[in-house]
Amino acid sequence: MSDETLLADLVALAARAPSPHNTQPWAPRVVVAGPDGPGVEVAVVPGRTLPAGDPTFRDVLLSLGAWVECAAVGAAAAGRELVVEPLPALRALDALPVRGPADPERPVLRVRLGGAATGSPAATPADVRERAVYRGDLAGDPAVYDDLPAGTLAPGLRLRAVDPAVLARLVRWGGVGTLARRPVAEELLHWLRLSPEHPGYARDGLSDRVLLVPPALARLGAPVTRHLWLRDPALGALGAVARVADAALTARARARGGAGVPAPERGVHHVLVADASVDARERGGPARAPVLDGRTGLPEERVLDAGRSLQRLWLHAHRAGHAVSPHSEVVDVPGPHAALRRHLGLRRSEVALAVFSTGRPLGEVPRAPRLPA
Ligand SMILES: Cc1cc2nc3c(=O)[nH]c(=O)nc-3n(C[C@H](O)[C@H](O)[C@H](O)COP(=O)(O)O)c2cc1C
């Protein structure tokens, strides 16, 4: 198989990478005559980012990292190493417009095939294709990450367990906090597809199927996702209710001082935490004040690498017969984010990048669609 054909296959495989709201913010292009031979240049699609919900590009970078990891799994299965080169535009994501297509002249990274792969890959292309998020009930196994192969987590990353009762409360608080913030709720609505009549139903976004929305509720909500004139009143009403609930949950959290309420165990819950001081030390600087380096407090390359680690964790769970359910709202909304930091006792230099539950799915796992190749 020629390198160009293999690269095209890797692009098709990496399309199965997870992304926030299934936005698929990547625009890969196979370049036959790159500086080091054939490769794939990946640009970011501005219209597939979440300017309101993901203003720091944390989730865009994590999903680009997941994309790279999926491509690397494919390359390893073909006996090759994947060489990843971050490009200057990766550090200038702020210069992107808020909508529109990708600019192929401003790729954020380039990948190419290297020499023979060393070691045996932990995951296979079939794992990449079959892995899926599941938002229903999960039967957790606390040992799921006890046998992580060495190198699953990039240096400076830690996986911290979260108490189920605390997480249940933070997820509720994050959920109402999301709906209470109008631009974030509007963005979520934009990516919701509650009926097959939605033009994006088989392409991207979050459908009633993957969200496990009861059919009656999906029928009720579907017109709101398709007709702009219905969005205003719907968001207004939802926002008003959510703001009251948000205020109540915030007040309750203050009164309780961070303790959780008992909740049914749904999976085991983890937070992927990066230590920003690692970068400062590597560059010989002080071990503090890394927040100047990037909008998450981490250099973009580190978040990209964390996305690769996150995908390795999710693939590891998949291989054990588990699924994951992410809860980004916990780190997106300031109240629950601060409470999570307190609960975990994070240092100032530590950044909570991703929160997710893992467990054996107790129902059929629906598959999310992808854009056509
Ligand atoms: C960085 C990141 C954050 C995510 N956050 C959430 C989340 O908060 N809630 C959720 O239900 N799914 C979340 N997801 C999962 C995506 O919605 C999911 O990957 C996408 O819909 C595609 O589905 P699939 O992974 O099952 O193929 C997240 C995925 C990524 C990569």
Image (cartoon, rainbow, N blue to C red):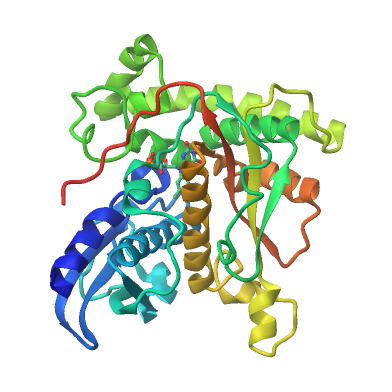
Q: Nearer the viewer, residue 99 or 322?
A: 322
Position in image of residue 175 (x %, y %) = 57, 32
Residue at 78% of width from left, 62% of height from top? 347
Residue 101 appears in view: no
Instruction: Name the quadrant containing residue 86.
Output: bottom left
Q: In which quarter of the image is the N terminus?
A: bottom left
Position in image of residue 12 (x %, y %) = 22, 55
Number of marks: 0
Position in image of residue 48 (x %, y %) = 31, 52
Q: Nearer the viewer, residue 83 or 371?
A: 83
Residue at 49% of width from left, 71% of height from top? 300
Question: Looking at this rendering, what residue extends furthest in the top direction?
Answer: 216
Position in image of residue 174 (x %, y %) = 61, 36
Residue 203 sits above or below residue 349 on the image: above
Question: Looking at this rendering, what residue extends furthest in the front direction?
Answer: 120
User: Which image quarter has ligand 1?
Assistant: top left
Residue 268 sits above or below residue 86 on the image: above
Instruction: Name the quadrant containing residue 263.
Output: top right
Residue 274 sits above or below residue 33 on the image: above
In the image: residue 158, left or right of residue 2: right
Q: Nearer the viewer, residue 27 or 17?
A: 17
In the image: residue 125, left or right of residue 169: left
Residue at 65% of width from left, 40% of height from top? 269
Residue 20 sits above or below residue 226 on the image: below
Residue at 58% of width from left, 30% of height from top? 176
Instruction: Name the quadrant containing residue 104.
Output: bottom left
In the image: residue 257, left or right of residue 229: right
Residue 205 appears in view: yes
Q: Which of 183 and 90 is in front in this view?
A: 90
